[in-house]
């Protein structure tokens, strides 16, 4: 079910403001692709355009082609709701639904997709997804309790379980560990390694060690200059990126000699 | 907006220092005086109602407007008051929730803002104008509808219409509609505020799972806003209960108890009854009317109190 993503000539706007310009890349299936770069360079904006979440902001729009499974996501007639059901997303801050139990949180996406589910079927999905998110043993005795009662790291894994419960083709993660402590971060990174065998994962991170640890390929975004749009500076295998990058700006950023 | 009380750092206690600044003590004195005035006014009103209303406990016959005792006199009025107010809420709740959603989530921002102003403007119309409008425009306009309801749905007790059928539009149902329009601004404004406060991260969580806009609203906005909507409706109910002028002008009240909403014989409301009868009342009849006022005071006080309580209790953390 994992799919590759081909991006060609993507420009992303907020109203009249061009935020990200001219991105071309090809994201491999069953791999982890990390985006790094300074704040405000458009990496999260670009990530959000991969599942058409960018356009929920009034006035925001995307030009260019993003092709998943031979289908251009931005072709006329493509329903953004259908796109988001295929491409899951995990956010910076854990956001389980506050009024729902752990059980209902995991099933939230499935309940949107299909009207009726048998109880046993639902139970199976919940267990499988929570196991997939390495959360099952911690919560199996309190599935009826509110999801907000969990710790921050557990909440984030619950959000991952909720995202993979609908078996998406691609999983997008927008700085999934930036609100978490080091132990929870490590748990999520282990999880990303395991999920890689089944999903195409794209992750935005501010933490370069994290990018080096979890990703197979890395994209470095930067602003051309203050006030100018962000763009993709370099896209290479992570090993090459961190040892011997093609671009001088990438090396400056990675080695901390930036600005 | 969550626990402000527990998160605050310990307050700096400067009571030990001698030098109290003049500005501080003047301001705190003024603020306390303002707070105290409210309490005194409320206590004064309650005291007046109890003292003046108490003699009516034993009223009967002449002083209870020909009724056997005070309960028989007040109960139909209370029933009418509650019926009109509940009718108004049944009408206003879906309308206000829908309007608030349009303003907060559906309309483009500029349109939503102007629509919000427009609805707030409804609150600026004096109630006597609503009364005139209800009596002169709305009531005649609704009469054909009442005739149709009576002819076709007359088997439902609400639309019985009486033996001769509806002959005028000044029914409890019309009064309910007028009250609904009057309560619309406050209910809509509160709903709009709580809808807007739905955390963005929860809305995005729903959208990212592939929820449509309506599914997103059902999954995140409604659960988050539920207690806010309930308290908004109860505050609107409080307003509808006490409304006098519009009901007095619109409703042709007979002081009876009926569930027929469109008949010629309608229940009257406490506030309208006081307004219509007080001018001609004298002696113990005054006590009777004041006693009915006390009943209304207690009921609307309770409704407002419950509304506030639900609002404060149900704040969802997130």
Image (cartoon, coloured by chain):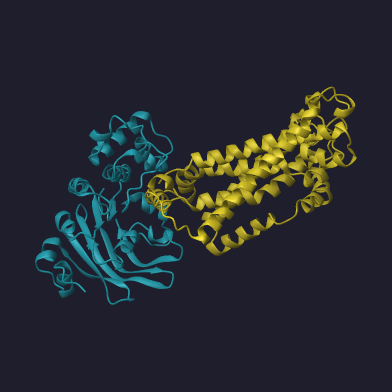
The structure residue drawn at horizontal position 52% and vertical position 49%, both measured from the top left corner, is B194
Q: Classify residue A11 by image quadrant.
A: bottom left
| Along the viewing direction, whichever of A184 and A121 lies nearer the viewer | A184
Q: Classify residue A239 by image quadrant.
A: bottom left
Q: Is residue A213 left or right of residue A103?
A: left
Q: Is residue B153 visible?
A: no
Q: Position of residue A107 (x, y in %)?
A: 36, 39
Q: Is residue B9 left or right of residue A233?
A: right
- As drawn, the residue found furthest toward the front would be B18
Q: Position of residue B265 (x, y in %)?
A: 84, 33
Determine whether A226 is above or below A239 in the image.
below
Q: Position of residue B119 (x, y in %)?
A: 65, 56
Instruction: Find chain A in the image and tell me its colour.
Output: cyan
The structure residue drawn at horizontal position 40% and vertical position 50%, both measured from the top left corner, is B11
Q: Classify residue B263 by image quadrant.
A: top right
Q: Position of residue A93 (x, y in %)?
A: 32, 51
Q: Is residue B235 visible?
A: yes
- As drawn, the residue found furthest toward the top would be B68
Instruction: Find chain B in the image and tell me its colour.
Output: yellow
- As drawn, the residue found furthest toward the left would be A243
| Along the viewing direction, whichever of A126 and A42 lies nearer the viewer | A42
| Along the viewing direction, whichever of B122 and A6 lies nearer the viewer | B122
Q: Quadrant of the C terminus of chain A?
A: bottom left
Q: Is residue B47 left or right of residue B302?
A: right
* Total labels drawn: 0
Determine whether B131 is above or below A126 in the image.
below
């Amino acid at each position: 079910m994992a799919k590759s993503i081909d991006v060609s000539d993507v420009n992303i706007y907020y109203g009249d403001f061009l935020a990200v310009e001219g991105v071309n890349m090809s994201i491999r299936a069953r791999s982890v692709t990390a985006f790094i770069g300074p704040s405000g360079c458009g990496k999260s904006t670009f990530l959000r355009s991969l599942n058409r979440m960018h356009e929920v902001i009034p006035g925001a729009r995307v030009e260019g082609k993003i092709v998943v499974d031979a289908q251009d996501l931005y072709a006329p007639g493509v329903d953004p709701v259908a796109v988001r059901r295929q491409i899951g997303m995990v956010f910076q801050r854990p956001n389980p639904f506050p009024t729902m139990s752990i059980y209902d949180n995991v099933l939230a996406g499935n309940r949107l997709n299909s009207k009726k589910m048998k109880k046993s079927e639902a139970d199976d999905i919940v267990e499988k997804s929570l196991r997939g998110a390495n959360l099952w043993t911690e919560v199996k005795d309190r599935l009826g309790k509110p999801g907000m009662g969990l710790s921050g790291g557990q909440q984030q894994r619950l959000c991952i379980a909720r995202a993979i419960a609908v078996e998406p083709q691609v999983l997008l993660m927008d700085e999934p560990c930036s609100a978490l402590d080091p132990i929870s971060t490590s748990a999520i990174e282990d999880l990303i390694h395991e999920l890689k065998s089944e999903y195409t994962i794209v992750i935005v991170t501010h933490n370069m060690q994290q990018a080096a640890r979890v990703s197979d390929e890395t994209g470095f975004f930067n602003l051309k200059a203050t006030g100018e749009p962000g763009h993709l500076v370099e896209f290479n295998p992570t090993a090459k990126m961190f040892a011997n990058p093609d671009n001088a700006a990438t090396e400056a950023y990675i080695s901390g000699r930036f600005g | 907006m969550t626990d402000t009380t527990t998160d605050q750092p310990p307050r700096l206690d400067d009571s030990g220092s001698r030098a109290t600044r003049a500005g501080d003590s003047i301001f705190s004195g003024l603020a306390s005086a303002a707070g105290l005035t409210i309490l005194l006014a409320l206590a004064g009103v309650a005291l007046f109602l109890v003292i003046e209303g108490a003699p009516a406990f034993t009223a009967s016959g002449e002083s209870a407007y020909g009724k056997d005792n005070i309960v028989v006199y007040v109960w139909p009025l209370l029933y009418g008051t509650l019926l009109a107010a509940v009718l108004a809420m049944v009408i206003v709740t879906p309308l206000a929730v829908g309007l608030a959603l349009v303003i907060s989530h559906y309309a483009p921002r500029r349109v939503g803002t102007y629509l919000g102003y427009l609805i707030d403007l409804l609150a600026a119309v004096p109630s006597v104008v609503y009364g005139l409008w209800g009596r002169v425009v709305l009531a005649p306009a609704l009469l054909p509808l009442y005739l149709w309801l009576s002819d076709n749905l007359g088997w439902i007790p609400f639309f019985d219409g009486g033996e001769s059928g509806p002959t005028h539009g000044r029914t409890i149902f019309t009064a309910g509609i007028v009250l609904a329009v009057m309560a619309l601004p406050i209910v809509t404004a509160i709903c709009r505020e709580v809808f807007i406060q739905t955390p963005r991260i929860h809305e995005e969580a729903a959208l990212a799972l592939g929820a449509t806009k309506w599914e997103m609203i059902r999954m995140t906005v409604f659960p988050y806003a539920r207690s806010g909507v309930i308290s908004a409706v109860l505050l609107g109910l409080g307003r509808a209960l006490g409304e006098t002028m519009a009901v007095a002008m619109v409703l042709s009240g007979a002081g009876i108890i009926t569930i027929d909403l469109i008949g010629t014989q309608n229940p009257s409301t406490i506030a309208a009854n006081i307004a219509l009868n007080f001018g001609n009342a004298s002696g113990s009849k005054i006590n009777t009317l004041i006693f009915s006022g006390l009943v209304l005071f207690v009921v609307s006080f309770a409704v407002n109190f419950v509304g506030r309580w639900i609002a404060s209790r149900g704040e969802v953390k997130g």
